[in-house]
């Protein structure tokens, strides 16, 4: 009894230590991200004062704004100010929309999440079963086909696939709606509440908008899903192959378990790694959405960043980069934490 | 010849090395996919090397009377919105692609390798500091960061290369560190250290060659991703500046004419697909040969 208590406290302590290490790592990474975006913002060849006052402002106005922006202070103080502002959710004002950047991002981010969630759903629902199947029937015809499909998914530029998809399914076959999130006609009818069109339409019973949105979503969502599926298939297959080669699988077979039960056994042991992979693939989709959004004119964060980029609107670009970067880091940390919870072996593993 | 290569007790170092090489090549050429990958990569090299001779026309020659012509005997892949021959531009575009991947590989491989083996071999606080930095960079989204970098550095092929390199080295540092940790405490390294070899000598002469094969495999596999990111940057207008032939930018050119002139956007895209597929297959094949675990 005493021994088990001792063991428990040991593992508890180890758990707390891992948590502390991971939290400090997370904070450090976010700090690094902010430092990088700050440096990018400082070396950019755009004068932030001129952007505000215009190039015909008198010298004293220029000097005043220069001081207001804190540009006369040493660099480390400017960075601390930047940290302080970001901590309060203040990313400055966008030159392009002349709105608060944080507000802009709050308006654009839901659209990106819609795409990434759809992509991950498609990727997981197709990728996991195909990966498992392909590992179980290793080197069969089916396995070869699945591997080729995954390989192509790895090698295709998504923006090109998007264009081809639009050409075939929208222009030629007319199966799906074209670019944009909903038809322009609905843009002003829709009641906005959550920012997610699907939810808003459902909440207010606007079913025509709901259908219209789905027909806009299906093509970019399916393409992102294909990318994520390729990744998930590859990882699932190699995890399953590793497990199926273990001795406990041989034992289970020798004991006469049905093939289905054996596969279920192996799959349970893959689950922890798989959750990590799915969290990572969601993070990749968040960033992969940048190109997809450009092709499909999908009003998400990626489109916001690229549009601001060409307007030399650095506040918006850096804030967008920070938000996507932070979500990325958060998902990474989250998947690490999930891995620790589900897989005891990684708890004490120190590489 | 074959028996000389496969001799059980080679009489010289050269013979032993050649014998090993022969075995590797033999198992490599047994896999049809790997050979296809190798062919595609060689094709890219040939295209880039002989671009002026393979191109049927000047890739920058505009002919506004011949805009958006469909593929024909004169223009094998048709012409774009400025009347330029797409076949010639695709061929010349291979040079841009090759330049980017060669430069990225030349920066990222040695840099990641150096950081990884130093961290792994030194251990202690050097290791911790270097790995924390690596982890921070590893956690960054590649494309988005590359986007921000190119925005600062003004769009050009060079800034695309720098942006991609800055975001890709951490994976190699991790890989090289893991390999170094595996060898660090092995007997032959300790024997060399006891003989008085300096850390530099151990790292360069003994650990680097051991890490090299996995780094090369990883580089080959990564090249596909690099091509895709470079094309993405080009597509967004952040790669090569306008007249230069670059596949991503060519797709962007064709975007406005997609509905009537499909060939403008689709053909450069096919080129990207084929080349990145080639690197993926080649990398898979090389991993199967070089990685003893999966043999």
Image (tube, rainbow, N blue to C red):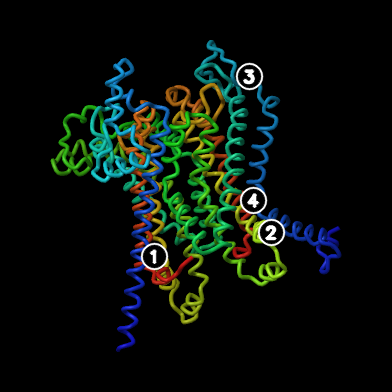
Dot label at residue B58: 3
Q: Nearer the viewer, residue A65 or B140?
A: A65
Image quadrant occupied by the C terminus of chain B? bottom right
Q: Which residue is at a point 38% across and 55% down the rendered structure image?
A: A332
Chain to which mark 4 belongs: B
The residue tagged 2 is: B201
Q: Are marks 1 and 2 in contact (CB under 8 Å)?
A: no
Dot label at residue A271: 1
Q: Which residue is at a point 35% across and 44% down the rendered structure image?
A: A324
Q: Residues within 10 Å of mark 2 (few under 14, many from 20)?
A: some
Q: Is residue B8 left or right of residue A335?
A: right
Which image quarter: residue A172? top left
Same chain, labels 1 and 2: no
Q: Residues within 10 Å of mark 3 (few under 14, many from 20)?
A: few
The residue tagged 4 is: B34
In the rendered image, residue A321, in percent from the top left (x then y), is placed at 36, 40
Mark 2 vs mark 4: give the one in front: 2
Tell me the distance, in whole angstroms, between the alpha carbons under discs 2 and 4: 35 Å
Mark 2 vs mark 3: give the one in front: 2
């Amino acid at each position: 009894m005493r021994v088990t208590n001792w063991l428990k406290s040991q593992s508890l302590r180890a758990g707390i230590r891992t948590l502390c290490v991971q939290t400090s790592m997370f904070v450090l990474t976010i700090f690094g991200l902010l430092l990088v975006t700050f440096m990018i913002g400082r070396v950019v060849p755009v004068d932030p004062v001129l952007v505000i006052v215009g190039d015909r402002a008198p010298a004293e106005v220029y000097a005043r704004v220069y001081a207001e922006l804190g540009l006369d202070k040493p660099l480390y103080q400017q960075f601390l100010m930047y940290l302080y502002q970001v901590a309060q959710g203040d990313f400055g004002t966008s030159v392009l929309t002349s709105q608060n950047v944080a507000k802009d991002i709050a308006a654009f981010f839901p659209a990106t999440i819609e795409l990434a969630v759809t992509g991950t759903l498609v990727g997981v629902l197709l990728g996991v079963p195909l990966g498992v199947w392909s590992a179980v029937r290793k080197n069969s015809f089916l396995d070869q086909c699945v591997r080729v499909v995954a390989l192509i998914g790895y090698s295709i530029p998504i923006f090109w696939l998007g264009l081809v998809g639009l050409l075939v399914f929208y222009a030629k076959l007319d199966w799906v709606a074209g670019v944009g999130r909903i038809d322009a006609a609905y843009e002003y009818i829709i009641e906005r509440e959550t920012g997610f069109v699907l939810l808003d339409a459902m909440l207010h019973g606007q079913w025509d908008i709901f259908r219209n949105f789905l027909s806009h979503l299906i093509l970019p969502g399916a393409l992102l899903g294909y990318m994520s599926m390729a990744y998930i298939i590859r990882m699932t297959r190699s995890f399953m192959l590793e497990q199926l080669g273990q001795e406990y699988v041989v034992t289970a077979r020798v004991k006469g378990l049905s093939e289905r039960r054996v596969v279920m056994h192996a799959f349970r042991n893959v689950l922890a790694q798989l959750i990590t992979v799915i969290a990572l693939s969601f993070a990749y989709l968040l960033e992969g959405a940048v190109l997809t959004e450009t092709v499909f004119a999908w009003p998400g964060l990626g489109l916001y960043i690229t549009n601001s980029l060409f307007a030399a609107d650095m506040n918006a670009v850096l804030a967008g980069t920070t938000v996507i970067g932070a979500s990325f880091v958060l998902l990474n940390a989250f998947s690490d934490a999930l891995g620790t919870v589900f897989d005891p072996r990684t708890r004490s593993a120190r590489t | 010849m074959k028996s000389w290569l496969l001799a059980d007790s080679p009489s010289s170092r050269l013979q032993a090395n050649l014998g090993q090489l022969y075995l590797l090549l033999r198992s490599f050429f047994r896999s049809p996919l790997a050979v296809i990958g190798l062919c595609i990569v060689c094709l890219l090299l040939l295209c880039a090397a002989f671009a002026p001779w393979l191109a049927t026309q000047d890739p920058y020659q505009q002919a506004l009377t011949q805009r958006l012509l469909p593929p024909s005997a004169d223009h094998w892949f048709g012409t774009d919105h400025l009347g330029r021959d797409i076949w010639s531009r695709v061929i010349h575009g291979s040079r841009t692609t090759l330049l980017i991947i060669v430069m990225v590989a030349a920066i990222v491989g040695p840099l990641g390798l150096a950081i990884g083996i130093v961290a792994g071999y030194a251990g202690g606080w050097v290791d911790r500091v270097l790995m924390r930095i690596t982890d921070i960079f590893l956690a960054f989204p590649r494309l988005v960061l590359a986007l921000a970098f190119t925005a600062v550095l003004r769009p050009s092929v060079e800034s695309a290369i720098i942006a991609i390199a800055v975001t890709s080295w951490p994976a190699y540092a991790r890989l090289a560190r893991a390999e170094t940790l595996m060898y660090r405490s092995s007997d032959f390294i300790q024997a060399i250290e006891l003989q008085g070899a300096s850390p530099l000598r151990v790292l360069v002469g003994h650990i680097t060659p051991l890490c090299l094969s996995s780094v090369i495999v990883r580089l080959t596999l990564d090249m596909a991703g690099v091509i895709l990111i470079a094309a993405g940057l080009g597509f967004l207008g952040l790669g090569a500046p306008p007249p230069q032939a670059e596949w991503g930018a060519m797709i962007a050119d064709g975007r406005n004419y997609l509905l009537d002139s499909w060939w403008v956007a689709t053909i450069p895209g096919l080129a990207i697909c084929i080349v990145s597929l080639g690197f993926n297959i080649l990398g898979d094949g090389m991993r199967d040969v070089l990685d003893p675990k999966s043999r």
